[in-house]
Amino acid sequence: MNTDQREVRVRFAPSPTGPLHIGGVRTALYNYLFARKYGGQMLLRIEDTDQNRFVPGAEDYIIESLNWLGITIDEGPVNGGPHAPYRQSERSEIYRKEAERLVAEGKAYYAFDTAEELEAMRKRMEEANAPAAQYNAITRLQMKNSLTLSAGEVQERIASGAPYVIRLKVPRKEDVRLNDLIRGWVVVHSSQIDDKVLIKSDGLPTYHLANIVDDHLMGITHVIRGEEWLPSAPLHVLLYRFLGWESTMPQFAHLPLLLKPDGNGKLSKRDADLGGFPVFPLQWKDPFTQAVARGFREDGYLPEALVNFLAFLGWNPGTEQELFTMDELIQAFSLEQIHKAGARFDIQKAKWFNHEYLRRQPNDRLAEAVVRQAAADGVDCPVEKAEKITGLMKERVTFAHELYAESAIFFRAPESYDPAVVSGKWNDEAVRALTAFRDALASAEDPLTAEAAKTVLATSLAEAGIKQGKIMQALRLAITGVGAGPDLMITLEIIGRQETIDRLQLALDKLAVGSSPS
Ligand code: GLU
C-alpha cells in the first residue's frame, strides 16, 4: 500500500472520559498492527481538552488496558518522546497560537454570542424551515462576531474579558473531498459543515482543532479510527487546508462499527449487560458512583484470546486460519482487508478463542490457579494433582477459573447419583463388575496410574466374564455421580487407589439394584 514515503506514524487518541470501550481497544489494536507491520511508530495521545467530561483514573485505565493486551506504545505520556507533552491539556498554548493564526489570516473569527443569542438564532432558522440550523456562511452575518463588529469593538470586548469563542470560517459553496482507505471517496458540500468552534470560551481547544494540530505536529501519517468520526473528517480536511498543511495530511481509515450480537444497531453497554458479557477490557469502578462494570480480564479472558477476537471484528486475513499470535497478526494485517460493513459482536466467538488459547497453555501455569482456588476453598491440592487436573480439564472449559470449579469430583465423592444413569445402567452385572474391580484394586500397587487402573479393570472383568463396554457407565457413575465426563482412568489416577475403592464401596452400598437411588 502507499504509505506516502514517510515513516509510518499512527496514534491512538482516546479521551479519558471513562473506561475504554472495547471498540476503542480494537482501534488501538489496528493502529498497533499497522505501525508494527510497516516498522513505524505508535503514539498514545490523551485527548483531555473537555474538562467537563474528564474522569479521574481513566488515563491510567487506558494505559493498563494497552499493557495487558501487549499493545506497546513508542511515544506517549508514560514513555515521553520527541513531541511531548502527549496530553492535550498540557498543550493549550500550541492550539491557541494556531487558532489565532487562522483568525489573522481571515480563516477563522472571534464570536461573542451568548447562549441566548445562539438559541434565538436556532429558533429563527427552525421557523424559517432552513435546512440546517447552524452557524454558517449566511447566519454568521447576523451574529456578534469579528466579521460583523468593527475591529475596535472586537478589541474592546476581548480587552474587557468578555467571553468569546473562535470559529472556523467554513466556505459557503465548495465540495470537500477525502479518499478514505476503507470507505473510498467521501464528498461533502461545505454548506453541510457549520462554523465549528475551534477554541471554546474556557480558552481550551475543541477536539477538532487539537486533534488536527497534534496529528500534524506529531507527524501522523495515517489516522485509523472508528466510523463515528467519519462525519467529522471533511471538517478535518478543511482544517488541514486552512492551516496550510494539506500536503502532509494523513491518510484516513475509518473502521466499521461494532454491532449488537443480533447485528441490529450499534453495540451498547446495555446489550452487554443483557447478554451477560463485558464491553470493557478491565473491570472499572466509577469514581463518582462507585458502580462496578465488568471487564474481560476479570471475567477470565486471556489477553491473547481477546486480541485475536478483536482483530477479527472488522478484518479478515482472507484465509481459513483463525488463530493468530500478535506477531502473526502483524504479518497478516492490512487495511485493504478491513470490511466496510459493521462487525457483529459475537461473544460466543470470544469464548471460543479463549478456550483455544486456554487449552494451549502449559499445565503448570494454569495449575497455580487451581492450587490457589482450592486453598481458598479450604481444600488441600498438591501441585502435582493440580497439574493432572489441569491437563485433563483444560480441554473441557472456557476459562481458567472453571478448572477448579468443574473439578469437584477430584476432591469429593459424589453426593448423589444421576437417576437416569442409575435406572439405565446400574444392574446386577454392574454390581458384580464393580465388586470384582474393587477387590482387585485392594491388592494393586500405589500410586495407581491410569495404565495400571486400566489393566486391573480389564483383568478383573475378564475373570468375572463381563464385557467392559457394558459396565463403563456404571463405573463412571460410581466414581463421579454422572454418566459423562473426562477420561475415567486418568480420573482414577488423580483420586488415587484408596479413594477409588472407597467410592466403589459407597456406590455399592447406596445403589441397590431396582430401587430408587438415594
Ligand atoms: N479523542 C477522540 C476519541 O476519543 C479521537 C478520535 C480520533 O482518533 O480522531 O475517540
Image (spheres, rainbow, N blue to C red):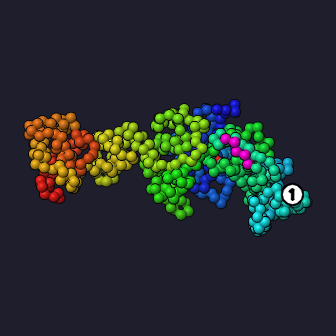
**Which sits in the foreground, 156 or 506?**
506
From the image, which quarter does the C terminus lie in? bottom left
Q: Is residue 418 left or right of residue 63?
A: left
Is residue 157 on the magenta stretch?
no
Between residues 99 and 342, which one lies in front from this camera angle?
Answer: 342
Residue 397, given in percent of the width and then of the height, sits at: 36, 46
Taking the spot 10% from the left edge, 42% from the top edge, the residue there is 436
Q: Is residue 343 visible?
A: yes
Residue 11 on image: x %, y %: 64, 42
Residue 75 seen from this side: no
| Most common secondary structure along the magenta stretch | strand
For the residue pair 87 and 500, the one nearer the viewer reads as 500
Q: Nearer the viewer, residue 508 or 141?
A: 141
Q: Residue at x 45, y 56 (%)?
A: 276
Residues rendered magenta in the picture: 184-188
Q: Residue at label 1?
A: 147
- Does 389 sit left or right of 205 as displayed? left
Q: Secondary structure at mark 1?
A: loop
Q: Horizontally, is 10 left or right of 127 in the view? A: left
Q: Which amino acid, by three-letter code, is at mark 1?
A: Leu
Residue 418 place in picture, x, y as percent: 22, 54
Judged left or right of residue 490, residue 91 is right
Where's residue 363, x and y in %? 35, 39
Identify which residue is drawn at 36% across, 49% down.
Answer: 402
Q: Residue furthest top?
A: 5
**Where 96 falls versus 73 (above or below)?**
below
| Residue at figure coordinates x 46%, y 42% from the top left | 305
Residue extending farthest to the front is 129
Count of marks placed on residues? 1
